[in-house]
């Protein structure tokens, strides 16, 4: 009947982080918007939440990388 609903973008990004190792590069906003089908602003807000909780770090001019794995409750 309707299209299958994707999980919220934040949940999708948390799932992706859990497949990576600490120190791994994280995909760009462009790659994430394509993978999730979400607007860039939505992806940015989810990335900001992950940065704010210490899961991701931003390296100026080099993108993002995994700083810590999220807790099971995230």
Image (tube, rainbow, N blue to C red):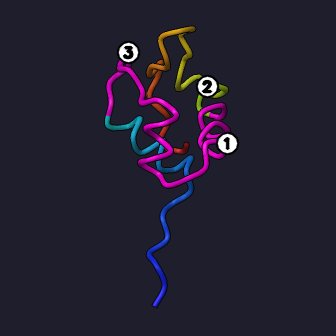
Q: Main secondary structure of the magenta part?
A: helix
Give the secondary structure at mark 2. Answer: helix
In primary-sequence order, the first of circles 3 and 1 is 3
Q: Residue at x 53, y 23 (%)?
A: 56
Q: Residue at x 35, y 20 (%)?
A: 24
> Is disc 2 in contact with disc 1, using a CB cutoff of under 8 Å?
no
Residue under label 3, please give it.
23
Q: Residue at x 62, y 40 (%)?
A: 46
In the foreground, 69 or 8: 8
Report which quarter residue 22 is drawn in: top left
Answer left or right for 25 relative to 71. left
Of marks 2 and 1, the one in the foreground: 1
Q: Which mark is residue 41?
A: 1
Few, some or many residues within 10 Å of mark 3 (<14, 14–19, 20+): some
Answer left or right for 36 relative to 49. left
In the foreground, 16 or 42: 42
Specify whether residue 38 is painted magenta.
yes
Q: Is residue 34 above or below residue 65?
A: below
Q: Is residue 33 above or below residue 29?
A: below
């Amino acid at each position: 009947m309707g299209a299958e609903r994707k999980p919220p973008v934040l949940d999708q990004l948390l799932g992706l982080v859990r497949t990576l190792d600490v120190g791994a590069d994280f995909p760009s906003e462009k790659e994430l918007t394509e993978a999730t089908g979400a607007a860039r602003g939505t992806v940015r807000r989810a990335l900001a939440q992950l940065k704010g909780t210490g899961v991701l770090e931003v390296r100026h001019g080099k993108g993002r990388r995994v700083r810590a794995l999220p807790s099971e409750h995230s």
